[in-house]
Image: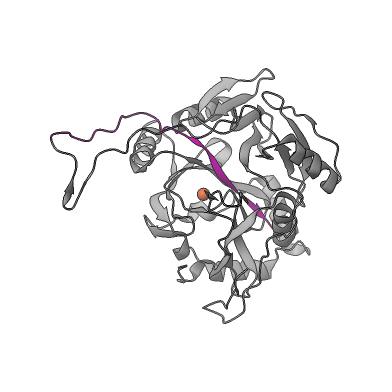
Amino acid sequence: MTTPGVHPDSGTPYQSVTRAENPCVRAHDLALLEFAGPEPARARAFFETFGLRCNDGPDGSLLCSAEAGAPVAVIYRQAPVAAFIGPTFTVKTPQELDQLAQRAGVAAPYPQDLPGHPPGVILRDPNGVQVRVACFNDWRELPACGPAPLANRGPDRARTNSPLRPPRRPSRVLRLGHMVLGTPQWEATARFYIDTLGLIPSDVQALPDGRPAVAFMRCDRGDEPADHHTFVVARLPVLDFEHAAFEVPDLDEVGMGGEVLREQGFRRAWGVGRHILGSQIFDYWFGPDGRKFEHFADGDLFDAARPTRYHAMSTAGLAQWGPPMPQAFLRPRLGWRELGQLLRNLLTDSGFGFRELRLLARALRSKSLPD
Ligand SMILES: [Fe+2]
């Protein structure tokens, strides 16, 4: 753990977000996401154009797959009201599931109601979000992407008499990469994922009063490198799934995938750009039920040794280059249910009141840039 330092705008010390010495288990990866909603046909049209393979599940659900990871990366169950059901994480061995069940005080592992029925346990995070942890026998490692396209770069002129024409088709989606959960109960939520699943805070963005606003957390794989972030907890006034991201091979797959989505009438949320924390090339799209899904490429990998770093929260700090973030990007999806939740949270001791709203608005106007 490094010394967190002070907020550059306010001079207030950053509050530490410590990693767990002895977590219940060390999750290996994010396996799949479950949604419910009234738009399965639109969900299918979006996910297929996004680059996932979609099939009908036996119970009428939509099952969407990437090339690697769990056999199914997204489940969309038909329901009258849109909802995020929750994430499923994976561990590598059944013994880890037993250990988790014992340490977390939940039922012993049993076959989950997921494609392939992998054994797993079901937890609830402090918000009540369902968190499954399962062990997939049929986990697929990343496929080879083939040789990198030849490129001309200054004096390095590798491509002659060979025009570059990336295929005009949906992106090759390699795998589910990460998701972001917005919550008013930031501290309890972050601690749950750190202490239960062993996630390591890679980078933390803080409010002007030093409290964390966003923690980008990675899986603890020891010496084996892991994505800079697999699960992100953001301090937001309503509980909601913020976005999920899927890895594609390179910039052309991001760009051409975006062209195909645009041609099919889908709406870009933000991109193309390159993030600062995580360094990914990114492109965000609005999918079913107004939720955001991201293509990314070329993200940072960290092993467990890299210490946590702290930064001032700012929208300027979210991208090294790219178009300015549209206002709509950070606006929570506000249906009647979310509006009620927002008012309740602001007016009660929810963890996100008017003070937090003011601090967040101030933070987002900050021009501070992370390293
Ligand atoms: Fe992302």
Q: Position of residue 225 (x, y in %)?
A: 53, 50
Q: Is residue 5 above or below residue 319?
A: below
The residue depicted at 70 percent of the width and 27 percent of the height is 114
> In the image as oriented, which residue stretches furthest toward the front?
223
**Left or right relative to 23: residue 298:** left
Vertical order, 337 against 353 (above or below): above
| Residue drawn at x 45%, y 50% as measured from the top left | 299
**Residue 328: in magenta span:** no
Residue sitting nearer the eye, 50 or 203:
203
The quarter of the displayed image where residue 123 is located = top right
Name the residue at 59% across, 68% down: 206
Residue 47, x across and y down, in percent? 51, 31
State left or right for residue 11 relative to residue 79. Answer: left
Part of the protein shown in magenta: 161-185
Q: Is 181 contained in the magenta span?
A: yes
Could you say which is closer to the camera, residue 276 or residue 327?
Answer: 276
Quarter of the image that includes the N terminus: bottom right
Could you tell me residue 44's position as x and y percent?
53, 26
- The C terminus appears in which quarter of the rendering? bottom left
Q: Quadrant of residue 151?
A: top left
